[in-house]
Image (cartoon, rainbow, N blue to C red):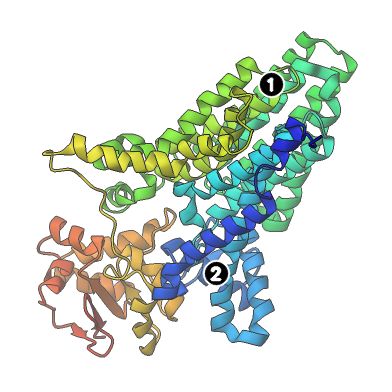
Amino acid sequence: MPHLVPPAEQRSTAAPKPATMLAIAWAVIVAALGLPAIKSGVFDMLSTDDAMRLVEVRDLLAGQDWFDLTQYRLDPPGAAMHWSRIVDAPLAMLILLFRPLLGQHYSEALTLVLWPSLLMGAALWLAATIASQASAAADRPQTRLAAILVTALSIPALMHFRAGAIDHHNLQIVLLLGFVLCVSDLEHRAAKAALAGFLAALSLAIGLEMLPAIALASAAVLGLLIWKGTEVLHSACAFGASLAGSSLLLALLLLPMNDLARPVCDAFGGPILLLSAGGGVALLAVAGVSRLRPTLWTRLGAAALAGALLLGAFFKSYPSCIASPYAQVDPLLVSFWLDRVAETIPVTELAQLQPQKLLAYYAFPLLTLGLCVAGIIGGTRQTRFRWIVSTVTLVALFGVSLWELRGAAAANIVAAPLCVIGIARLRADAAAGWRLLYMALLVSPATLGGIGFVVWPAFAAGTGGHKIAVADPTASCQTISSAAPLATLPPGRVMAPIDSGPAILAATGHFVFAGPYHRNNDGNLVMVHTMMATPEAARAMLSERQVDYILTCNGSADQQDLVRIAPDGLAAHLGRGEAPDYLEPVQAVSKSGWTVWRVRK
């Protein structure tokens, strides 16, 4: 009589081993994202933020104080950066680890490839574990496999894991995936609740991009405590204590004592410390009241009072933080620079410029939200919180992506495992064989994005079309290699396009005035005003700031806008080859597309 394999066991062996597929998917993605670096060199793959991060890490290794985040060669005598040493530290350690064997240059190159590759592997593993955690034991191999492949096809997020991506977005995405993994299982394991609180605080200490998602998920934890009371008391206390304690410890690790309460609205500082640590304490307070008087209305009243006190203290102490994070950017710089940054455009502008990309960025998380809502409605009491906290997290990420395109990366990659879980829940037979994989791939970000590119030309025929202007980094003087010839000149102060600043800092020992950072109002305005001024007026401005060199780049958006706005300005004159007598061209380091001028003293 033939041996009959039970259906559950048959399902568990129908698909390849998830660990094998994870390794294959990771290797394929790393190779695909690293191919451009092989052609042009990994240093030329750096974005402006990546280049500035490399400069910051080098300064740390050269002895700059841990608490000092001033970039002294940006807008001399220096501009304060809003980034975190949490990202600098592992990069610096990797460079130090490899430097004795490879030297400074190759240790940096290896770090630029290794760091995003390791984070990509972590993202794939976390996505697979999120899907596995919510699946029946017999279905876990299939759900892991589907989650790995859909995550690997989360096109909007992959750019943050390419070779050279060392800014902070990839690490924040990985931390958020870890947070979702832990917080969705919070009511069952207090240890995961504590880890979720730590990951939330760590993400906020790096940057505020994930603040809306973490805030809504934390509110869901408070809602769980109100709903279930003493049943989840230990987990809620573990989350609150970890969030508050981790926030305070990270503040002591990253901030000087006199800066703990400083009103820093665009980075980890007094306002975020108040919200994160205060929110954790508020959760503990509600838990304490629940223990004394375990009734729903008592918990609801305590939560309302704690929330009102926390928000009241925040609005009273830091009223300026209610405004947009870009409120401090000068209006001239908003129109000249910020409005043309592709990752900051809202969905309405994307719909006007490149509607064929709407499906690529928004369709997959929106579809997943529908699956999550179905999970909430059809879920059991044991699984409902998992669906609720996942849904509110994804809602926050999707909302951010509607405001700024950069939010679509996290929204798509977090949606990947949730989509797989949602499909498996809707179809009882989905996990059998390859069915779940086929269904997940059919709705993956890559598939939906491809549909948009295929279908849109039929609708756009005869309309002329629109597109977002994306500058070629080489033609617009943004690459390390394009700035490298400047290193042969004696160190000096360089007046250059905004997006050229980080490359010049990374490739040379020069100082620059302009850089693509919202805190650099002064340096950016100095460059714009000087290059828009008449040659006679510009001479006094250059003298006042002790400028040594001017870099004009015909392929940069700055140069084009300066010529358009001020046709009689210094930039326009230089673009036409009409240099005033106080400037002399430096032919030795000028190359196709850009020209260097020395200011005669």
Residue 197's x, y, as percent? Answer: 73, 40
Q: Is residue 534 above or below residue 326?
A: below
Q: Quadrant of residue 386?
A: top right
Labels 2 and 1: the sequence-earlier one: 2
Residue picked out by circle 2: 113
- Identify the mark at residue 598; answer none if there is no mark: none
Residue at the far right: name it: 292
**Is residue 179 among the parts visible in the rendering?**
no
Asked whether, in this view, residue 480 is left or right of residue 148, the answer is left
Asked whether, in this view, residue 304 is left or right of residue 459, the answer is right
Residue 568's x, y, as percent? Answer: 10, 64
Q: Nearer the viewer, residue 360 or 529?
A: 360
Q: Is residue 26 above or below residue 223?
A: below
Residue 241's x, y, as percent? Answer: 80, 37
Asked whether, in this view, residue 518 is left or right of residue 584, the answer is right
Q: Nearer the viewer, residue 523 or 376?
A: 376
Q: Residues within 10 Å of mark 1 (few under 14, many from 20)?
A: some
Callout 1 secondary element: helix
Q: Is residue 80 above or below residue 538?
A: above
The residue shown at (45%, 41%) is 445
Mark pair 2, 1: CA separation: 41 Å
Q: Residues within 10 Å of mark 2 (few under 14, many from 20)?
A: many
**Is residue 156 among the parts visible in the rendering?**
yes
The residue shown at (65%, 22%) is 308
Which amino acid type corresponds to the residue marked 2 in the rendered image? Answer: Val
Which image quadrant: the C terminus?
bottom left
Which image quadrant: the N terminus?
top right
Residue at the far front: name it: 1
Callout 2 secondary element: helix
The residue shown at (18%, 61%) is 560
Residue picked out by circle 1: 384
